[in-house]
Amino acid sequence: MQTSEKNGVYISTYGCQMNENDSERMYSLLEMANFTPVTSADQADLIIINSCSIREKPVHKVYSEVGTYRKLKEQKPHLKIGVGGCVGQQEKDNLMKSAPMIDFVFGTDTIDQLPELVFRAIESKERQVNAKFEHRAPYHVETLVRNPGVSTFVNITKGCDNFCTFWVMPYTRGREKSRPMVHVLEDAKKLVKRGVKEITLLGQNVNSYKSDCGADFADLIEKVAQESGVQRLRYTTSHPKDFNQKLVDVMYRNQPVVCEYIHLPFQAGNSQILERMNRGYTREQYLERISMIKKSIPNVVLSTDIIVGFPGETEAEFEDTISLVQEVGFETIFAFMYSPRPFTKAAKFEDQVPEPVKSERLQRLFAAHDEMAMKLVKRYEGQILEVLIEKYDEKRKTVSGRSTQNKLLHLAGDASMIGKTLPVRVLQAFPNTLRGEILSTQDLHA
């Protein structure tokens, strides 16, 4: 179904790469229905808020953003406002009761039905809700990317079967399903033909991927690396309990196509807290996985996710988290204060850690890691890294891109460099970014 004239659509996105990828899919579907993407809400005839609900703050942000559109809706009575993503799935009933300006709500499993939902809201003038899970339907979906650019995502799984006590995803994205390997490979080949140089395979837990042909995640990595023609291959996110020797062996023998960067969340450094989280491994088992990875991939670069202030966490247990960070030597960490989420077991635990304690611990964790990270990244100074140029900043006359170690580099350059992989000498190294210079012809032949 299409509109008879072009209507502007603006999508506001919060959250992880999964949400960003979902928004791209929404734009693609709505463009096919004659909507035109616009860069600001005041230009739009249709506004969609696509938000994550892993933590409490983004949920509040959705309600706040809806409120900011009140005057806009008064000026443009035809304006339709919708909420999707995990917040739409989780908060559908509350949204319809407490936010009368919202015209429609949809869930994570009904994105492909978005155009029909929008038109129902327009034509019937009645508020619409579509947030049902299709539990039995297979996961068959084509990757839709309007302008994939140099680097893009390809979904390989959706949903999650890991019922961690803090984890709301099984309730907002449903049970886990994997796409057939042949479909993933076809999408990768199509994207490469469109100029994509780097693909990130995306899922809530990519390690548990299982194709209908019996192929596991390691098989998929090898297939895409060897047959798609892509220059670089990454993935996110993986789970420690499913990380195995087969995967690291496949990664190592398929370098440099498969990047040596691994993001492996550990969440807490104490085994008792991990048990309360229902993570499925102990501190010792996590460190065994790290040892296996480092032995098999000597040039590996590691990052992780951490939750601070989980219910019942003592000072000594928090110190175990800091010591694990230091023992592993993560170059990058993504750390957050624990946030109680609806439907989860941990939200009902009575021994919640006070907010000031959580905040103080988070700052101490960042401080400890910053000191370590600064020393770790100094090793890059003077090194020559292969950098895939992704963006050009016309104002600063600089380009930026990432190395296979997932390091962001900035250097002088022009737009003609976008999409090229160039040897870059690192001049300065900071925990979050590196600064470098492209090697001269003389350097290359020295």
Image (tube, helix red, strand yellow):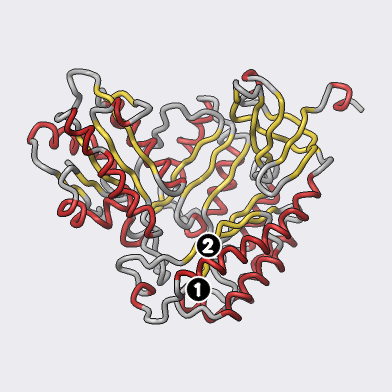
Q: Which residue is drawn at 39% across and 74% down?
A: 346
Q: Residue at x 21, y 38 (%)?
A: 70
User: Crowding at label 2, few (<14), some or many (≥20) Cα neighbours within 10 Å?
Assistant: many
Q: Nearer the viewer, residue 299 or 412?
A: 412
Q: Which of 207 and 71 is in front in this view?
A: 71
Q: Quadrant of residue 199?
A: top right
Residue 367's x, y, as percent? Answer: 66, 61
Q: Which residue is drawn at 14% across and 44% down?
A: 128
Q: Which residue is drawn at 51% across and 45% down?
A: 201
- Above or below, 48 relative to 204: above
Residue 403's x, y, as percent? Answer: 68, 39
In this picture, residue 309 sits left or right of residue 377: left
In this picture, residue 218 sits left or right of residue 279: right
User: Crowding at label 1, few (<14), some or many (≥20) Cα neighbours within 10 Å?
Assistant: some
Q: What residue type is labelled 1?
A: Gly
Find the distance from the CA under tag 1 to the CA under tag 2: 10 Å
Write down the residue under mark 1. 280
Q: Quadrant of residue 350?
A: bottom left
- Above or below, 158 relative to 39: below
Q: Which amino acid does label 2 sit on?
A: His
Do labels 1 and 2 touch, CB within 8 Å? yes
Write down the residue under mark 2. 239
